[in-house]
Amino acid sequence: MNALKQILGGNTRQFGMIFALVFLVVFFQIMTGGLTLTPDNVINLFNGNAYVLILAIGMVLVIIAGHIDLSVGSVAAFVGIVVALTMRDWHLPWYVGILMGLVLGALIGAWQGFWVAYVGIPAFIVTLAGMLLFRGANQAVGHSNTIPVGADFQYIGAGYLPEIGPNTGYNNLTLLIGVIVVVAIIIGELRARKAKAELGGEISPVWVTVAKLVLICAVVLYATYLFATGRPGTSFPIPGIILGVLVLFYGFVSSRTVVGRHVYAVGGNRHAAELSGVQSKKVNFLVIMNMSILAGLAGMIFVARSNASGPFDGTGWELDAIAAVFIGGAAVSGGVGTVVGSVIGGLVMAVLNNGLQLLGAGADQTQIIKGLVLLAAVAFDVFNKSQGKPSFIGLLTRGKGKAASPEVTADVVPNSTSETISHSA
Amino acid sequence: MVPTSAVILEMNSITKEFPGVKALSEVSLQVKANEIHAICGENGAGKSTLMKVLSGVYPYGTYTGDIVYQGNICQFKDIRASEAAGIVIIHQELALIPELSIMENIFLGNEPTRFGVINWREARRRTIELLARVGLADDPDTPVKEIGVGKQQLVEIAKALNKSVKLLILDEPTAALNESDSAHLLDLIRGLKSKGISSIMISHKLNEIEAVADAITIIRDGKTVETLDVAADGVDEDRIIKGMVGRTLESRFPDHTPTIGEVFFEVKNWTVAHPQIADRLVCKGSNFNVRRGEIVGFAGLMGAGRTELARSVFGRSYGKYLSGQIIKDGKEVQLRTVSQAINAGLGYVTEDRKTLGLNLLDDIKATTVSAALKKITHNMVINDDEEYNVAEDYRKQLRTKAPNVDEGVGKLSGGNQQKVVLAKWMFTDPDLLILDEPTRGIDVGAKYEIYGIIQKLADAGKGVIVISSELPELLGLSDRIYTIFEGAITGVLNKDEASQESLMKLMTAAKKSA
């Protein structure tokens, strides 16, 4: 277990999540008799969840900064319908529609960010108001009708990489992307190793690095194989590409730029951040605004995938996104969380959903299990804290003496579903 | 009626330890009936800890020694138990709920009930009675947030009276009060004495103690120094100060010969109001300056306005700026935000590391660069390697004890946390570094190292301001010391003319003040 931990890197919670994800995939693969890891199902999984994962990227930043956004579903629906309507009535080309959707998302975000950052109303309230407001606006603008969108716009939600080059029996572009990812991972790992050695840091043994690379590359290549061998006409889905680009971009921004650092600083200790010269109002404004831009994007992708925008698009999305973020290791009190972790958290939820559906579980059972998983993931964190290990959820009680007493948390922790998560991590 | 000489409370050989610190060691205290007993000591001497032991905040078993109260050994397991015995503590920060009315506050946790339902008629009747006893004429239904601090203090006392108090403990009761309110409160305490209620009072205002106390116990470094009988011993303020500071200065400071240059930083007529209460001034026309290579101390009791002054100068990060100028290198500068202050070459190490100074979730390297991210950012990207190197350099230079710079700052000891904070500000390369209580909660060895770092900064031609509650620290470290009392600068002493006594006088604005 320790070696495994070393291979997958230091972060316990993230390690736990990756492990849980792999476990779930293998579990469902066996239970469904091989139906989980089929090209169609994997493509479906990505297509059907890309919008939630995109929301999770924005949501994790909001939560790191110490806020929450309940309005994302309504904002997504409102942007979706406005884009669908204007493209239909004003005959706008698809790219103008997308651009307009993003600008509209930014405007909505600026509105909400203004109230949160500059007036000082808690984001919970502002976005609860936004949830009602933009749901109503969606239905007012669309007269509660469903508005179809054109085929070219549908590409961003339901499209695939085109077939180009010689006929290899596989989708060439998908293969190319897979190879590029593998090469990038290997180069990145080796460079990190070299840099660490130069700085005199502690470097892991060679076998660990090799094992880690083999493992990750195997997973990537297998996924590439699955995506490249789907039904004719399918391949790596476009929403997957958008998601990938966003993960890279936001992962980078959050860890390697000044504004990213400031988001963590404001969420971790706002006073300390301000006394270090961080303009916390600006940071809060940007984070909230960014969330609405991504909500707009998610809304458009959903509309494109379902070929039309409807009055009930996006209901409950905020909860899926928030759940993904917390499963992915963020803390309610802010300051903690990662973009990658949240996407993994979202994937855990997605695989659960998908696997249970394949097993023929009803929506009722699926919801119950998802609820328990969310609770267990956070309970694990609290439990860890009571064992004296670093935990961040415990910081909720920050400044009020001791964290939750061990007896209380011990009761909540492991039952059947949480077992996998708590143990692996 | 108890005879006046009877001892109502005896605390014998109380020892209380916190992990790694002995807060109280063999402290004894004797309070007679019908007496106002003052406890004096510097900040951190252990006064509040002693009172928390007495009132059951630290329950029986967490300390050693005996509490004998009215002839019985008491083992209070919580505040309720001590209150049941008639010992009531009124904390420095008032424990009233602002949104509730005077009456609701007085009966909070002690509501008169009939068949489980609160009997408000009874409560009102008793409230009116209690308010009359403390001399408060307000309506019992007035929300507490609408009355001033002085009246709130009276409500606290009414609340204590309602619990049939026999021994009242007041922790800095007049700290937040103006003069007339203070006088009224002290009169009330005297009045209670004549009605058989003894009081223990902790206060920094020595003139008040001299005026009101019958006996004084002085505590220093967690030990009882002496108990004085005010009337018999002819105690005055000088006598109390002597007891409070009577320690000899050991060589707790690295040797240092300052090289002091010209004045480069000057603050003139600095006036700032409280952030919420517009008519309360926290800085009253303060003037001070700092020379290159100089370590300037700021002495003042807690709440005197030292931090408020420092933070308002540091990019107006506290209070409402009213007037005043900041002149740096001969030019007036406008420092409206913290970033402007940092860019102008100021740094401020906060008093309270954990709530104001550090993001405890961060690691050492991220903290070290957090106030000067621009310096390691190229083309909008933070350079990880540089970050690591910078942090590692400072870790070695300041000898921060941590396995590596990836360690979370939350896991470090106080002294090492402070070194990381110092590294963070040193990396901004400030001309003037303000250090607010730089050694609070830090053990002696680490203090010595931090003094060394401060002196090195001064030797590099920087100006350093040190705010501290520990006078020996200021005397050992500073080249010049300003004293602050109630938001105003009351004096400035050069190193050779400053002593604990002279500073204490200026800090308490004693009658014979210079």
Image (cartoon, helix red, strand yellow):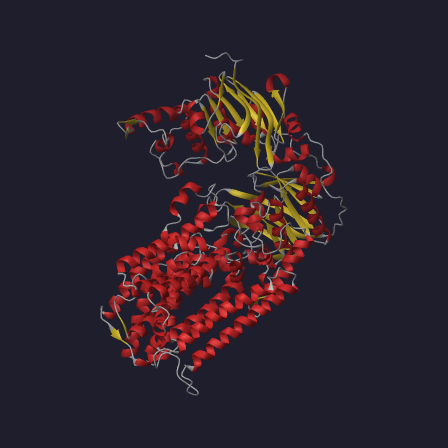
Asked whether, in this view, residue B268 is left or right of residue B102, the answer is right
Quadrant hosting residue B475: top right
Quadrant hosting residue A129: bottom left
In percent of width and height, residue B9 lies at 52, 19
- Asked if A237 appears above or below A270 in the picture, the reply is below
Q: Nearer the viewer, residue B60 or B70?
A: B60
In percent of width and height, residue B122 lies at 30, 25
- Asked if B442 appears above or below A300 in the picture, the reply is above
- Asked if B465 appears above or below B28 in the picture, the reply is below
Asked whether, in this view, residue A219 is left or right of residue A126, the answer is right
Give the residue drawn at x 61%, y 43%. Answer: B437
Can the viewer see residue A292 in this picture?
no
Image mark count = 0
In percent of width and height, residue B157 lies at 43, 27
Asked whether, in this view, residue B337 is left or right of residue A350, the answer is right
Q: Nearer the viewer, residue B163 or B478?
A: B163
In percent of width and height, residue B302 lies at 57, 38
Q: Residue furthest bottom?
A: A166
- Asked if A95 appears above or below A315 in the picture, the reply is below
Can the viewer see residue B445 in this picture?
yes
